Amino acid sequence: QSLEDLKAKLKPKKTAISAEMLDTANSYDDKVALIRMMVGDEAGRVSNVFKAMMEKDMNVI
């Protein structure tokens, strides 16, 4: 095994945050915590979603 293989094994795996987790979050604070985790893990993806939402709104105006 190479050093890169060992590093890959030791690297923690990302946990996927599903839409169901938002549905089961009981309080507003739980939902905010989940959104913060999502933005921390996938900031680019979240940014693209907001860009797409704003583009749709700009086309309506």
Image (cartoon, rainbow, N blue to C red):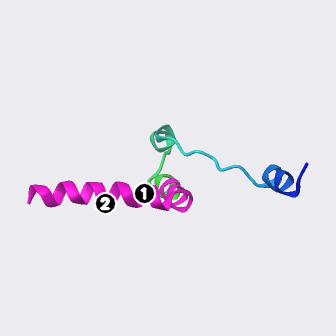
56 sits left or right of 7 in the view? left
Q: Residues within 10 Å of mark 1 (few under 14, many from 20)?
A: some
Quadrant of residue 17 within the rendered picture: top right
Q: Position of residue 18 (x, y in %)?
A: 51, 41
Dominant SS in magenta = helix
SS at circle 1: helix
Identify the residue at image location x=88%, y=57%: 3
Q: Position of residue 6 (x, y in %)?
A: 86, 53
Q: Earlier in the sequence, mark 2 or mark 1?
A: 1
18 sits left or right of 4 in the view? left
Q: In the drawing, what numbered circle is on residue 4?
A: none
Q: Is residue 39 magenta?
A: yes
> Observer-nearest residue: 36 or 29?
36
Task: Please give the range of residues in magenta.
Answer: 34-61
Identify the residue at image location x=49%, y=37%: 20
Tag 2: amino acid: Lys
Residue located beneath label 2 in the image: 51
In the rendered image, the residue lying farthest to the left is 61
Q: Position of residue 54 (x, y in %)?
A: 24, 60
Which image quadrant: the C terminus? Answer: bottom left
> Observer-nearest residue: 41 or 22?
41
56 sits left or right of 15 in the view? left
Q: Are marks 2 and 1 in contact (CB under 8 Å)?
A: no
Q: In the drawing, what numbered circle is on residue 46?
A: 1
Identify the residue at image location x=52%, y=53%: 34
